[in-house]
Amino acid sequence: MVNYLYDGTFEGLLTVIFEIYERKAAPAQIVHATAELPGLFTQTILVVTNEVKADRVWQGLGKKISATAQTHLYKAFLSEQPQIGMLIYQYAQLAFASTISIEDNFAADCVRELAHLNKQVFRESHRMEAFIRFQKTADDLYYATVAPDFNVLPIISKHFEKRYADQRWLIYDTKRHYGLYYDLEKVSQVNLEKEVTDRSGNLPADILAQQELLYQELWQTYYRHATIPERKNRKLHLRHIPLRYWKYLTEKQPSR
């Protein structure tokens, strides 16, 4: 039994799966290279990501499961759960060994657990698409910060690229310290040396566009006046907009 370490990328995990089959050495654990591993007598292998090997595994899976199932597998990976490496390896092992589709084989723990994680990640990505609010800076950049439960930026990128195709924007994940920047042509991953927002996700007033604070105040005023106190239903409201997402909403912030 071998502990396999990788760089935390999806391609890195696929490379690990390739190495497991090539070495014929079953994994004890498959974890990020920074993880602490117990046990003194288990061999540990650091696997370097290899795109060719990763692609061979991905193409091989494509012959065993549908494109939709592959997408779900990737979304489950974005959950970042500690056991995700082993779950995906077990799923791949099951798929490669089976002569029929395993996609609906929920009797298998790995299939059932990955389906559950896929749903959780999808729900979080949908909420990010709904609740992200941009602030306009003086140089016409629309900036938003998020700290989602799962690493959903890679799967919400297309939504914002299509919806805001005519403006530059940056969505920055303060939990994972990277963001997506759209320059009117393509989306690129960026890392900021210094994060510029406060704990509430607000940019400093001196770098905002001249009218941004006014627009925020107008929206907050509209929200307050559109609310009918007698018809408030906090329980229903929290069901649709859980409390942890309020920090993204302009209408929920105190006036500046």
Image (cartoon, helix red, strand yellow):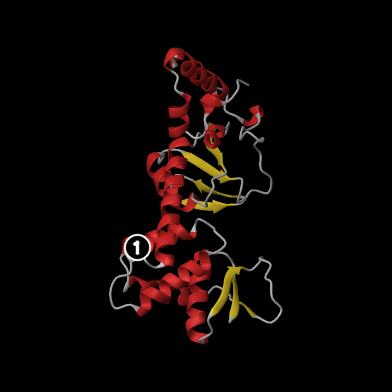
Q: Is residue 92 above or below residue 196?
A: below
| Picture quadrant where residue 231 is located | top left
Residue nearest the observer in this picture, 189 or 147: 147
- Side of 82 relative to 162 (left or right): right
Q: Where the C terminus falls, by quadrant?
A: top right
Judge the density around disc 1: few (<14), some (14-19), many (≥20) Cα neighbours within 10 Å: some
Q: Residue at x 45, y 58 (%)?
A: 76
| Picture quadrant where residue 244 is located | top right
Say whether residue 26 is visible: yes
Residue that numbered label 1 is attached to: 69
- Side of 34 relative to 186 (left or right): right
Q: Residue at x 46, y 76 (%)?
A: 52
The total of numbered circles placed on residues is 1
Q: Label 1 amino acid?
A: Ala
| Picture quadrant where residue 32 is located | bottom right
Q: Give how far across and how far down residue 166 sits, in percent.
A: 41, 38
Q: Where the N terminus falls, by quadrant?
A: bottom right
Give the SS element for disc 1: helix
Q: Give how far across and how far down residue 48 sits, in percent.
A: 58, 75
Q: Is residue 75 above or below residue 29?
A: above
Q: Residue furthest right?
A: 40
Q: Residue furthest left?
A: 100
- Side of 234 relative to 35 (left or right): left
Say whether residue 186 is visible: no
Q: Give how far across and how far down residue 41 sits, in percent.
A: 69, 82
Q: Is residue 193 above or below residue 90?
A: above
